[in-house]
Image: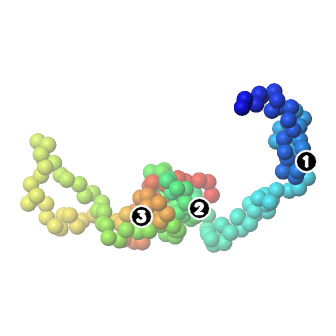
């Protein structure tokens, strides 16, 4: 059996969904088959207003510097936050969503291995437990959806975000 030639295929009318035959030479584009007199189901002109009222209820009248999202899955993490004065890519917040605090892990500020002037690690006996306990303790904060680390939670119950995507609020 010989394959159909493209010219012969172009001369045969196509079967439309409604059962009507459509000649492909008469069909300019698929837009010709769309009825624009009917409004699409997925469009709602009032949706932006509804979303704005929802966000205002969530914030309870407070203003925010940004809406924070996870950099990996774009899940909303915070609607009400303050931008850090010095480090512009960092934010702090008290009320968050879709975040989990890893209470089993503790991070300490300023905890690093000290080196002496020759570049060798310092003698472990020279560091005391008191010196290690100084500095504020933090717990890592992760996105609840994808477990990406997005910030830390401090002893004052404030979230500090540094690995997030900010957007205008």
Instruction: Give the mark nearest the N terminus, 3 or 1.
Output: 1
Q: Quadrant of the C terminus?
A: bottom right
Image coords of residue 12 (percent x, y): 85, 35
User: In this figure, which colouring scheme has been used for the structure?
Assistant: rainbow
2 and 1 marks in contact (CB < 8 Å): no
Residue beneath the point at 48% across and 51% down = 89
Disc 1, SS:
loop
Toward which corner of the image does residue 108 lie, by quadrant?
A: bottom left
> Would residue 65 be visible to someone looking at this image?
no
The residue wearing badge 1 is 20
Disc 2, SS:
loop
Q: CA distance from mark 3 to mark 2?
A: 20 Å
Circle 3: is it few (<14), some (14-19), or many (20+) Cα within 10 Å? many
Instruction: Give the mark nearest the N terminus, 2 or 1.
Output: 1
Relative side of 46 to 160, left or right: right
The residue wearing badge 3 is 141
Q: Nearer the viewer, mark 3 or mark 2?
A: 3
Of residues 139 and 160, which is closer to you in this image? Answer: 139
Residue beneath the point at 25% across and 58% down = 111
The residue wearing badge 2 is 64
Numbered badge on residue 142: none
Disc 3, SS:
strand
The image shows residue 164, relative to residue 152, as above or below, that is above
Residue beneath the point at 41% across and 58% down = 149
Relative side of 143 to 112, left or right: right
Image coords of residue 94 (percent x, y): 49, 69
Q: Nearer the viewer, mark 3 or mark 1?
A: 1
> Would residue 148 be visible to someone looking at this image?
yes
Image coords of residue 160 (percent x, y): 43, 61
């Amino acid at each position: 059996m010989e394959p159909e030639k493209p010219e012969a295929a172009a001369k045969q009318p196509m079967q439309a969904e409604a059962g009507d035959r459509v000649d492909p030479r008469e069909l300019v584009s698929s837009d010709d088959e769309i009825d624009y007199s009917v409004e699409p189901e997925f469009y709602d002109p009032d949706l932006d207003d509804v979303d704005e009222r929802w966000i205002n209820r969530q914030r309870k009248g407070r203003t925010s510097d940004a809406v924070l999202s996870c950099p990996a899955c774009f899940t909303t993490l915070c609607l009400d936050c303050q931008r850090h004065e010095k480090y512009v890519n960092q934010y702090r917040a008290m009320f968050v969503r879709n975040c989990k605090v890893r209470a089993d892990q503790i991070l300490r500020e300023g905890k690093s291995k000290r080196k002496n002037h020759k570049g060798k690690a310092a003698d472990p006996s020279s560091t005391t437990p008191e010196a290690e306990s100084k500095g504020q303790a933090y717990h890592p904060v992760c996105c609840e959806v994808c477990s990406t680390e997005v910030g830390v939670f401090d002893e004052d119950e404030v979230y500090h975000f540094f690995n997030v995507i900010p957007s205008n609020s």
